[in-house]
Amino acid sequence: MTSPKSETHVAVLGGGILGVSTAVHLLRSGASVVLVTESDLASGATGRSLSWLNSAGKRSDPYHQLRMAGIDRYRTLFAEDPTREWLQFGGGLYWAPAGEAAKAEARHEYEQSHGYDSILLKPGQISALTSGIDETAVSDVAVFNPGEGWVSLPHLVEYLMAEFAALGGTLITDAGKSRVLAKDGKARGVATQNGSVYAADRVVVACGAATPSVLEEHGAYIADGSPVSALVITEPADHRLKAVLNTPRVAARPNPGGTLALDHSWYEDQIVESDDGSFTIPEDAVKELTEEASRLLGGSRQLTPASWKVGRKPIPGDGEPVFGELEKLPGCFVAFSHSGATVGLVAGELLSFEILTKQKHPMLATFRPERFSRS
């Protein structure tokens, strides 16, 4: 998508994939951009995302269409250089707990009903389509989605930031908690925790799970359903896994350097939040998650956790993304989504279009912030 060259000055709050993608798309169209981050780039949810590229399962039609457009942008990037270790399309494999084959079958039927590439497999059929999985871990049936992939978002952010710098963007890191400045009822810039002010014609708030609290100051209510989660990265392992796995006890995907990225939800109630807002997860839970992944790979492989990060996973209260300009504060645009990985590239493209043309893109029509305040 192209937009007219612009002299618009935009301040983007947030150094994750949604903020960085929007900033780069704005720069491509000639805007002047300052990107302000609380700490380092990709230090929040972007740095601990499983980043599975998909539109599997059930969701609204507009959300499915947005996700499919998001996957399309990644396919274009992949086609430019299929050797990139941080972006691959090896499919996705899902199965339900033992005795609940009906869940997988219903998912497959729904996916087929709207043309999503979906194959229902018995355990003995898995190895013919994807490698590196112990078929005995699947007790009933599995759903294989050949068109899915994964991205390492920290690597993608690094890639995009090279273009950001080449296009003349200004990066402000370690700014602390920043706020949107308003004047005469419109967004006019941002102020950092240390008192620095960056004037702007437009402001983008892409602060992950903190987005609702940043907007609350200006009377905008965004329902927040962000849970606490973790991402574990293993030591390099001799594995042949290519697909993203979504199983009853662990989600796993390949990761650059021969490592694996792991997460799930069963341990969420074991995570402890400290008074300073930081989180810790018991090492026993990390060990159990890693052991679950080891069992899926078969053989005598024993994965070892190398590092893990814990924090809130950005999820709006109704599960659908929040994109677009605030009616309560014109000039302030919101980017808040659980599927930041899948929609990251296309969301930045569509938001930059809206910011620079002052036109509302039809693909974002159902994701406007005001759907919460009107309910």
Image: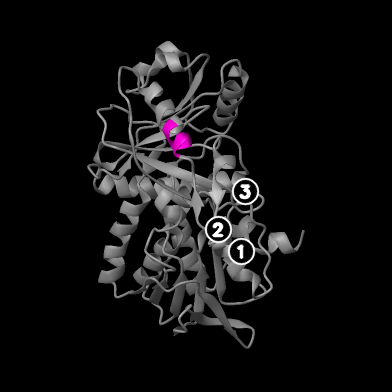
In this rendering, would 201 be left or right of 160? right
Find disc 2 in the rendering and name its residue: 209
Q: Quadrant of residue 113?
A: top right
Q: Residue at x 26, y 64 (%)?
A: 162
Task: Determine the CA span between mark 3 and mark 1.
Answer: 14 Å
Task: Nearest to the eye among marks 3 and 1: give it.
Answer: 1
**In which quadrant will I find the C terminus?**
bottom right
- The verdict on residue 214 being magenta is no
Segment colored magenta: 283-287
Q: Main secondary structure of the magenta part?
A: helix
- Tell me: residue 94, above or below residue 261: above
Please give the label number shown on residue 212.
1
Label 2 crowd bin: few (<14), some (14–19), many (20+), radius 10 Å: many
Q: Position of residue 1 (x, y in %)?
A: 41, 61
Residue 293: horizontal and vertical position, in percent?
Answer: 40, 28
The residue under the point 63% across, 76% down is 329
Q: Residue at x 55, y 58 (%)?
A: 209
Tell me if label 2 and label 1 are in contact, CB under 8 Å: yes
Residue hosting label 3 = 319
The answer to whether 98 is drawn above or below residue 6 in the figure is above
Real-space Cα separation, disc 3 to disc 2, in angstroms: 13 Å
Foreground of the two, 369 or 111: 369
Furthest residue to the top? 124
Disc 2 residue type (three-letter): Ala
Q: Is 184 on the left-hand or right-hand side of 289?
A: right
Q: Could you tell me how far apart the alpha carbons at marks 2 and 1 are, in whole angstroms?
A: 7 Å
* Sequence-earlier tag: 3 or 2: 2
Q: Amino acid at mark 1?
A: Pro
Vertical side of 326 occupied by 274: above or below? above
